[in-house]
Image: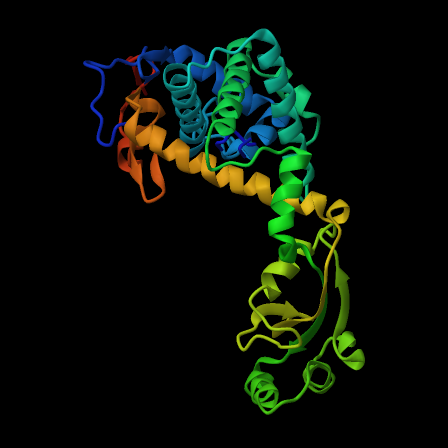
Amino acid sequence: MRRLIALLVIAVLGATLYGLYNNSSGISVNGAIVPSSTIRSELLAISTNPTLDCYLTLLGASSSAPGAGGASVKASDVTAWTNLRVEGLAIESYATTALNFHPSASTLAKAQDSLESELTQASESQSTPCKGTAAQALSEMPAEMRTFEVASQAASLDLVTKLNSTVPLTVASMKKYYSTHAANYDTICVSVAVVAPTDVTAFNEAQTSGMSVANLAKKFSEDPSGKKGGAYGCFAPSSTSYSGVRQATETLKINAYPSTPEEITYNNAEAALFVAATKRSPTPFAQAETAVLSDLENANATAANDQKEIILLKYTNVAIDPSFGSWGTASNGPEVFAPATPSSAVVGSTTITNLGTGASTYK
């Protein structure tokens, strides 16, 4: 669920900082403080453990590349982790105060299993999966960091189960959802036409004049399937290509190409891809179950992220050490922005200030 609440696997607008804020404070969320030393130890663990770095990237943190100094991390990567920290603390705070959530040892154990499972699934969905296991990634975290991740996952899971807009991921609930959305899981047979850009106008005019999908493919398509009328195969919900096929054909009538194609590269040249559904057949729930689960997970994640934004806007006060970023509101909601970096002219001057200690180093 990606932390809700990030997948779900995860401030009052314009909130003021808590009094005079100093570099030892790190992050403060609703009064809960994570010291700067803790954040720095976590960033060190992330930047020096490729397996941990890879899996945390799946939670929403960008990959931790080195910064300008030999022992530094890019400001954007510091911000990404700080943002996950703030979100997790905000969700924990809300779950505790608004939902009276106090996880037991068994609840935390289940949350760790859930987190490992979601990270594993997220990794396996990548073209290049992370090296090592999700369990290994957790073992590479400092103890406090690991405790935080598991507690945040537990709070996220509890929050999701209590949202009116989410659907429980039980077989009974999935079957009920499927029964009212069965048409979304039809097995879809498709035909394609790969058309040269110079022929798109003629292709559309021919279709408007009544030429069939098969004959259009035979006449215009550069793909080998054109010889057999563009027939490309049938895709059941269990197919890895199903979501793309469904999206490409969901607004079309049977045996009709869209008037606006997708632009692709074909044989190292620009081309227009037309995709048409030629047949739709009902699919039994047993064969559609994986797609139903995926759709519900995505819907629940969307609902959870909407709730996360409400939590951050209405129920959260945030203060951040400026060296880790600044709290503000972007187009997609509240988040941590990268700390300001000095210009090259400043970096080249004779005095460089260490933000962590306030000490100065002279050339």
Query: Nearest the camera: 168 or 245?
Result: 168
Q: Residue at x 31, y 16 (%)?
A: 30
In the image, taking residue 69 as reference, residue 118 lies left or right, namely right
* Residue located 70% across and 30% down the image: 131
* Residue 123 in the image: above or below residue 137: below
Most extreme residue toward the top is 105
Rendering coords of residue 70 (x, y %): 48, 24
Q: Position of residue 142 (x, y in %)?
A: 55, 12
Numbered marks: total: 0
Most extreme residue toward the bottom is 209
**Quadrant of the rendered structure where residue 318 is?**
top left
Asked whether residue 339 is in view, the answer is no
In-front residue for pair 36/248: 248
Residue 149, given in percent of the width and then of the height, sits at 53, 19
Towards the viewer: 115 or 320: 115
Residue 51 position (above or below residue 227): above
Q: Residue at x 62, y 27 (%)?
A: 50
